[in-house]
Amino acid sequence: MKCSNKRFDYRVKRVRSKIEGTQERPRLSVHRGHKHIYAQIIDDSNSSTIASASTLSPELKGKLKVTDTVAAAKSVGELIAKKASEKGVKKVVFDRRGYEFAGKVKAFADAARNGGLDF
């Protein structure tokens, strides 16, 4: 395992140890891959996923030419906010995993906030 992977895993554990999703405030988790961006709203007390969205979602798959950009992250943020409001979720806890709050992660978070999620 590379040293940078160990540091990333440590950051993931550190961030994750401080937050937990409940029924009142589920956890909004974001994963930034090399080609795609994934998001889930998770209720940790029931170990269930309430809503999910990604650049591979049918709603976005045809619209996006490039899936690893800030614009794609904004689209996923808007989509997850729309799906959350359909399920009646307004307040969430943001789980950025080990990623810096910059670039795609920040664009995703801002779009989700503009879509109606409160965190």
Image (cartoon, grey):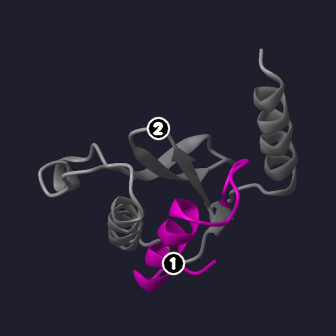
Q: Quadrant of the C terminus?
A: bottom right
Q: Is residue 111 above or below residue 36?
A: below
In the image, residue 26 lies at what x, y percent? 61, 61
Mark 2–mark 1 Cα distance, whole angstroms, equals 21 Å
Q: Quadrant of residue 59?
A: bottom left
* Residue placed most toward the observer, 78 or 87: 78
What residue does disc 1 label?
Answer: 110
In the image, residue 108 lies at what x, y percent? 48, 67
Q: Which residue is drawn at 68% across and 59% down?
A: 22
Q: Which mark is residue 34?
A: 2
The amino acid beneath tag 2 is His
Judged from the image, the secondary structure of the residue bearing numbered disc 1 is: helix
In the image, residue 39 lies at what x, y percent? 47, 52
Q: Residue at x 81, y 52 (%)?
A: 15
**Which region is colored magenta?**
95-119
Q: In which quarter of the image is the N terminus?
A: top right
For residue 66, side relative to residue 85 (left or right): left
Q: Residue furthest top?
A: 1
Determine whether label 2 and label 1 are within 8 Å by CB: no
Q: Is residue 90 above or below residue 15?
A: below
Q: Which residue is drawn at 65% across and 64% down?
A: 94
